[in-house]
Amino acid sequence: MMETRRRIARHVAGFEKVEIGDRPGMRRAAVVLCVAERDGEACVLLIRRSPRGRNAGQWALPGGRGEPGESVEQTALREFHEELGVALSPDDVLGRLDDFPASSGFVITPVVVVPEVLGPLAPCPDEVASVHYLPLARLTGDGVVHFHDTAQGPLLQMRLGPGTTIHAPTGAILLQFREVALLGNPLRVADLRQPDWTAI
C-alpha cells in the first residue's frame, strides 16, 4: 500500500485541477475517493445509497453537501465519518481532482484519501445500503470504460462488474481518478453527459 500511496500522491500533486468559482444558485458538495487494502488488494470504496432518501439505490462515493464555513476537505471527511463511521485524518488527504458540475445543481469536488489503516466501517443505514471495495486493478483494467450511443449522444458507462455499471457523475469521477491518480494521464471529464435520473 505504501507504494500505491506514493504513486497516487505523486500523480495528484502534479495535476493542475480545475476549480469552479461560486455563482448564484450553486451548491457545493465533496466526495471521498478512499483507497484502502482489502484481502491484500488496494481498493477504492464505493457505496450503494439507502433505498430511501436522496439518490435512492444509486452507486456513489461517500460524501455530501458542504456546510457554511467548511473547507472542501472538512466536508469530505465529515461526510465520510457520518456515512461510514470512520474518522479520517487530514494527513490522509493527498489532494483533489477537478470540480465536477453535476446536473443536479451541485458542484462536486473529489478528495483523494489514502489512510495508512482504515478502521472497521459502521455504515449509517439511513444513508448507506452497502459498501463495496473496488480493486484498483479492476478499475484500470480493459473493458471498463465504455461509451454507449444514445439519441442524445455518447453516455459514459463504467462497467466494473456484473450489476455494476456506473454513470456520471460518479462514473466520471471514477474515470478521472483512474486516469489521473492511478495512470498519470491528465484527463478532463466535466463535459461528460449525465443520465436524466441522476439529476435529482
Image: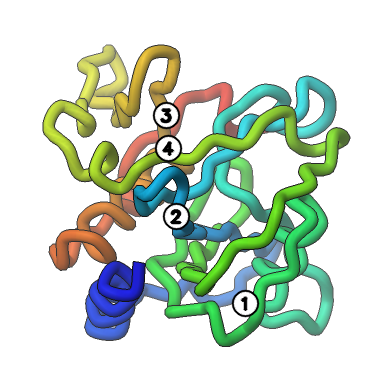
72 left or right, relative to 3: right
Question: Quick one: label 1 or label 3, which is nearer the N terminus?
Answer: 1
Question: Quick one: label 2 or label 1, which is nearer the N terminus?
Answer: 2
Label 4: few (<14), some or many (≥20) within 10 Å?
A: many
Question: Quick one: label 2 or label 4, which is nearer the N terminus?
Answer: 2
Q: CA distance from mark 4 to mark 3?
A: 7 Å
Q: CA distance from mark 2 to mark 3?
A: 22 Å
Q: CA distance from mark 1 to mark 4?
A: 22 Å
Circle 2 is placed at which residue position?
Answer: 37
Q: Nearer the viewer, mark 4 or mark 3?
A: 3
Circle 3 is placed at which residue position?
Answer: 166
Q: Nearer the viewer, mark 1 or mark 4?
A: 1
Amino acid, disc 4 = Ala
Q: Residue at x 74, y 69 (%)?
A: 87
Describe the element under mark 4 as helix, strand or loop.
Answer: loop
Amino acid, disc 3 = Ile
Question: Quick one: label 2 or label 3, which is nearer the N terminus?
Answer: 2
- Do we see residue 136 in this rendering? yes
- Do we see residue 26 in this rendering? no
Q: Residue at x 61, y 27 (%)?
A: 58
Amino acid, disc 2 = Glu
Circle 1 is placed at which residue position?
Answer: 73
